[in-house]
Image (tube, rainbow, N blue to C red):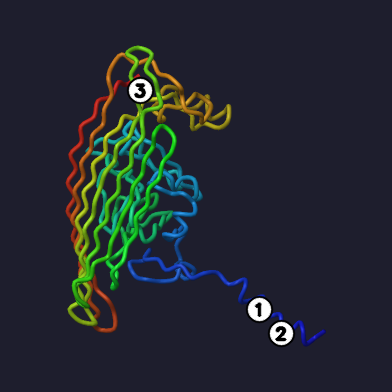
Amino acid sequence: MLLSVALWAPACIAFGQLEEIVVTAERREASVQEVPIAVSAFSEEALEALQINETLDLVEVVPNLFGGNNTGLATANMYYLRAQGNDESIATFDPPVGTYVDDVYITRQNANNFTFFDVERIEVLRGPQGTLFGRNTTGGAINVILKKPGEEFGGYAELGVGRWDGFTARASVDMPFSEKVLSKFSFFHQSHDGYLSNIVDGKTYNDLDNMGFRGALRFLPNDNVIWDLSVDYMETEGANIHGQLSSASTRISRSILTPGLPAGGLYLFTFAPVPFVSKGADYGNETETLAVVSNLGWDMLGGRSNLIVGYRDMDQEFLLNFP
């Protein structure tokens, strides 16, 4: 009996061990269990299993994270972490919860809601992160790390369909030119018809038509230097109609919060889609985003240094009818 217990104990320990998750919450690679920060990290496999397809889906799986489409814009999210947030998408307002893609800051909320494709992992850091991520992270930071080019030729392609004639297509391919020059090319398309009927003019709203592509290069001149260079472009078209405020879940909070604020076309006091809307004005939202990122890293003096340079250009046109 004692012998069987002794033999079984190591098996129990091995079975109970957690898979190591590597994060860069402190601007260096480390196990999430060793980082003294409240971090929620999701690998590519976890994102797929949890059906997290865009940034706003994170509110379903991250503790203390609240979010929603802001001012009726499908590309703008408001995020709250530890009661810090901003519900305005005005160009002069800085959000307290910063959004980063490959460590490059998205300066305004107007383009912080985007479809995930070819993502390596996502890290949500709760609490002030000003030391390493800058001043606009008093509530926390959302860091999206994209996949880097692989050393072997390969790729994937997937198609999906859904409600309201929804269609999704994603594809990515790794194409190494040599052992020292690697490349990756990715593409996605996402669309669905509108599901709100306007009883005034008969039009349907809250449709969506997204498209994007990304090209990435990785240069490996020697064992101590890695240079990642990427360019991505995204187009988004869609109108997110105002609904009455629905995020209040108790009678007390409902009486405090102001009715009529934009909440993505939802019933008051419920989370069900509104089947119709009565508006006399048209709606629209078109956004184009171009981003260029360069990350040059080199090992020296027993440590690692990185020079990160990013350029982001956004062109947005939208028409809203405020209540």
Q: Sequence order check: which comes first, mark 2 or mark 3?
A: 2
Residue 113 x, y percent position in the rendering: 33, 43
Mark 2 crowd level (few <14, some 14–19, many ≥20, 10 Å Cα):
few
Q: Position of residue 75 (x, y in %)?
A: 30, 39
Q: Is residue 201 visible?
A: yes
Q: Please tell me whether mark 2 sits on a helix, a strand or a loop.
A: helix
The foreground one among 93 and 6 is: 6
Please state which of residues 204 and 12 is positioned toward the viewer in this rendering: 204
Q: Amino acid at mark 2?
A: Leu
Vertical placement of 313 versus 43: above or below?
A: above
Nearest the viewer among 262 and 7 is 7
Element class at badge 3: strand
Mark 2 → mark 3, Cα distance in angstroms? 66 Å
The amino acid on which the numbered mark 1 sits, given as a three-letter code, is Ala
- Report the quarter where the N terminus lies: bottom right
Nearer to us: label 1 or label 3: 3
Q: CA distance from mark 2 to mark 1?
A: 8 Å
Q: Are marks 2 and 1 in contact (CB under 8 Å)?
A: yes
Q: Which residue is mark 2?
A: 7
Q: Which mark is residue 204?
A: 3
- Disc sitting over residue 11 in the figure: 1
Q: Position of residue 279 (x, y in %)?
A: 34, 16
Rendered residue at 40%/45% (across/down): 160
